Structures are given as structure tokens and as C-alpha cells.
Image (cartoon, grey):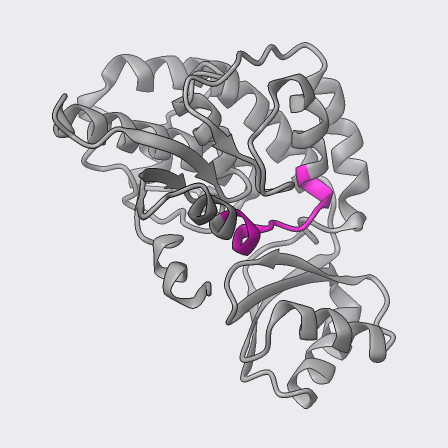
Amino acid sequence: MRCLVFPGQGVQRRGMGAELFDLFPEEVEAADAVLGYSVRELCLHDPEGRLGDTRYAQPAVLLVNALDARRRRAQEGDGAEPVAYYAGHSLGEYNALVAAGCLDLLDALRLVRARAEAMAAVRGGAMAAVAGIGADEVAAVLRRARVRNVYVANRNSDRQTVVAGDREEMAGAATALRGAGARAVVPLPVSGPFHTPLMAPAARAFTAALAGAEFRAPAVPVFSGVTAAPFDPARAAALLAAQITAPVEWVRTVRALRAVGVTRFDEANGTTLTSLLPAIA
């Protein structure tokens, strides 16, 4: 069986979507109307350097992911192996919900715009990718070192874990992790402690935006990155708010998808997630 996966924030780059915008002019025009600026101009030229800003990066990635998935579907035609499951990494889960029919693209854009604004409002945080030791050992090191306000944020593979937390306390965390055998602790270009309890103000703010959203039953199952289980539209608001403060359980999600029979993973808008698969036992 086949699963299509969608990456999240971090894959944005200048020139992103260059081959897509002319293929879907109506969708691009509608997205511009929702967001109040030209996504094409942002992605292709980024004249004001806004792609590094969470408020702009998240909607841009969502739209490019969605357009790439639509192009992929059109190119494959009716004879292709159908997608049996969808999944996404953090922000990418909104793309999975759109692809599965839970949300319309423009409704997803509105939610992601509110999500990005709420997340960008939490400042003073930092994130870093840790290589060389597993997520359980990373968590144990942080406990032993008594580093406060630094947490496991993404369990991306058996070889890569992302930690996040208070910017000042991250230095002590990095020292402890290197001392425990981490091969590298690489800072990531973000301003917030995403996917940690420090994001609670953002989750509360985003809950208000989720209150009026309607989620349909998916035509194809979507696996949640919070629970590593099929997404329940009846719990959509709770799951998507929790996503902001909970770690991204990508390792568990991939293992759960394999357990239900997925043998082929395809990815929209790049190979960020599929490149992690060989390092997930």
C-alpha cells in the first residue's frame, strides 16, 4: 500500500513552486485573496526576506505542498496505485487533511495563517537538531542534566531528534548532549520553541480560530503526528491545538503506517521526510 506524506515548515526556499503556479492560476489567485499578498512573489523572489518568518513560511509551504500534490495526481492518471493513507509532519498534516477531503484548501489556509501568527508570537525560543543518539537518550540526558525548559520536540528518525526550548537554556542542553555522545547539535533557524509546553500561549490563541472550523470524515485515512493513529475529525480541534505543544511523533507514525501495510512512501514538495525512512527501524 502507498502513503503520500507532506513536509512542514523548514522546507521553504526561494524559488519554491516555480513549476506550479502557472498550472493552478485559480487556486493561486484564491490563496492570494485569503492571505492578502502574492504567494507567487513571496516564493519566487522573496523581496523582503519573509520566507524566514513563520507567519509567511507556513502558508507558503501549505500552498506549494497542495499544488504539488494536485499536479502529482493529475500526472499519474487513473492507472496509478491509489493512495491508501496520508500523513504530514507538523504543518504538513494540514495538507494531509486537505488531500483526504477533511478540509478545503482555502479553509486550511485560513487556519494555518492563524496558526502561524499564534506561533510567531511566542519568542525567545530556539530549536536544534541532535544527531548520534536516539530520542529516548536525548530525553534522559536532559533530565540528568536538569536542564529546565528544553524538551524533545521532533522524533524524526532513530538517528535524528530535534530539541527545543528557552534560548538561553539551550546552550547548557547542547553541552550536555555533546557530552553524552551526540555527534552534532545543530541550531535551526527558528525563533520559537515549537512543539514544546512553552508554546501553550500559542495553542490557546489558536484554539479560538479552530472553534468555527468544520472537519469532514476523511475519504482516505490520515495518520496524526500527535497520536500516530488515524486522525479523528470529531477530535480535530483538540488534536490540532495539541500539535503546537506536543512533540512530532514521526518515528511512531511511520512505524504505525508500516504496521497497517504501507510499503511505499511518496512525498509532495521534496524528499525531506522520505530521506528519513531508512533511519527508522
Instruction: Assign the magenta stretch its main secondary structure.
Output: helix
Q: Residue at x 56, y 28 (%)?
A: 112
Residue 251 lies in magenta, yes or no? yes
> Up-down: is 120 above or below 167?
above
Report x, y in % for residue 94: 50, 29
Q: Residue at x 54, y 59 (%)?
A: 189
Report x, y in % for residue 155: 58, 59
> Up-down: is 155 above or below 215?
below
Quadrant containing the N terminus is top left
In this rendering, position of residue 113 left or right of residue 123: left
Report x, y in % for residue 272: 37, 54
Q: Residue at x 75, y 36 (%)?
A: 202
In this rendering, position of residue 164 left or right of residue 36: right
Of the pair 60 and 277, the residue shown nearer to us: 277
Of the pair 103 and 79, the residue shown nearer to us: 79
> Up-down: is 6 above or below 150?
above
Residue 247 lies in magenta, yes or no? yes
Of the pair 99 and 196, the residue shown nearer to us: 99
The magenta segment is 243-253
Report x, y in % for residue 97: 48, 25
